[in-house]
Each structure stands twice: as C-alpha cells, then as structure tokens.
Image (cartoon, rainbow, N blue to C red):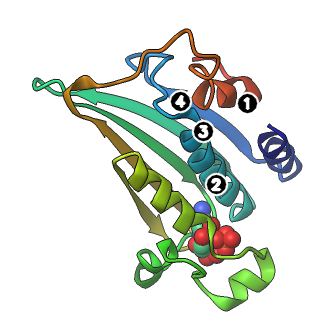
Amino acid sequence: DSTVKSMEWRAAEKELALTAHVKDAVPAQVVGDPTRLRQVLVNLLGNAIKFTDEGRVSLHVDMEADAGGDVALHFAVEDTGIGIPADKQQLIFEAFTQADGSTSRKYGGSGLGLAICARVVEMMDGHIWVESTPGRGSTFSFMRVDRDGKIRMDCSSPYAMAGLIALRDRFDVAF
Ligand code: ADP
C-alpha cells in the first residue's frame, strides 16, 4: 500500500495525470492472484511515472472471451515519457538491463523490475510486451489467459477485490 501511495504522490508531484480505464465487461472479482497482479502493476506504473516528466500515465484493462470459453485479460500501462529505442525493447526484460547508461544515471534503478514482471506474468500463464516510440512514450501490456474460463470468482476471499480494485481506490477513479 505504501508503494502505491508513494507512487501516487510522485505522480502528483510531477503533475502527471494518472488515470485508470476498465472496460465494463471486466468483472470486479477477476483478479486471479491479486498479489502477483498487483506486483506487476505496481512495477509498470512505477516505471511509467519514473520515465515520464510530462503528460499522463494511464492504466487500461480489457477482457476478451472467445466462443471456446477462453477468457483473456489485457492490462496496458501507457505513458507519454521518454520511450525506448527499438533495439532495446526486448533487452529490458532481461535482469540488470537498462535501455541506456545515461538514462540509468539520471533515473536510477536496478534493471530488475521488468525481469521480475516477466517472470511473474509467466507464472500467471501470460505474456508481457512493450510498444514504444522514443521521445513519445511507451505502452507496456500483459495478457493473462484463463483457459476454459477458469477465472476465480472467490468473492468470499478478503483478497478477491485486491489488486485492481485497490488501485482503483488509490487513484480515486470510477469504474
Ligand atoms: P529499472 O527501472 O530499475 O532500471 P526495470 O527492469 O524496471 O529496471 O527497467 C529496465 C529499463 O527499461 C529501465 O532502466 C529503462 O531504461 C527502461 N524502461 C522501463 N520502463 C520504461 C518506461 N515506462 N519508459 C521508458 N523506459 C522504460
């Protein structure tokens, strides 16, 4: 919670707009493993704020269900920050890799965050990728597919509404 709080504060300090857009079709309970989900979102949102000096950071959540019953949850963290050169867009998911030395001297960091995100998303049976234009911004996306609609709808769990919903409350947006 303190991580998200400090993130919100940092965004406010930089005067960035921080917004969340969650499609109506996404049930509130669709969180799977909220701890892991939150870990990835906190990392991606943290990076987006870190590497953006002007503009906005937005979280988008969408869900697609196909006729076979597979349900895909798609999360995208979009920023208007410094962007990532095409030849670095794969490398940054490796441990201890940063897009360039001067950037890391300015922004700090360990180069571990995205490697952890990639591993966690893999454990959720999903995948993660980035689309980015240097100087314009980046969108980090990850997708989690639930085969046969095996989505956990455990409303009785105190954690059922965590993750996404916690973010909603922190960012004080309606969805
Ligand atoms: P860290 O941020 O600690 O350096 P990460 O693994 O989280 O480590 O990120 C690796 C590198 O990827 C960063 O150093 C930066 O060069 C690049 N990067 C990650 N997210 C963004 C972003 N939203 N915008 C621009 N560059 C990014």
**Mark 2: secondary structure:** helix
Please report the residue visible at 69 percent of the width from the left and 61 percent of the height from the top.
52
User: Where 2 falls versus 141 (above or below)?
Assistant: above
To which residue does mark 4 refer? 21
Q: Is residue 26 left or right of residue 158?
A: left
- Asked which quadrant contains residue 74, the reply is top left
**Residue 117 location (% of width, % of height):** 53, 58
Give the residue furthest to the left. 68
Give the residue furthest to the top. 156
Report the Cα–Cα distance between label 4 and label 1. 11 Å
User: Where 6 falls versus 156 (above or below)?
Assistant: below
**Residue 130 location (% of width, % of height):** 43, 62
In the image, which is nearer the foreground, mark 1 or mark 2? 2
Using the image, tell me which numbered label, if any, was put on residue 43: 2
Please report the residue visible at 25 percent of the width from the left and 24 percent of the height from the top.
149
**Residue 134 location (% of width, % of height):** 52, 74
Report the Cα–Cα distance between label 3 and label 2. 12 Å
Viewer-proximal residue among 114 and 106: 114
To which residue does mark 3 refer? 35
* Mark sitting earlier along the chain (4/2): 4
- Quarter containing ligand 1? bottom right
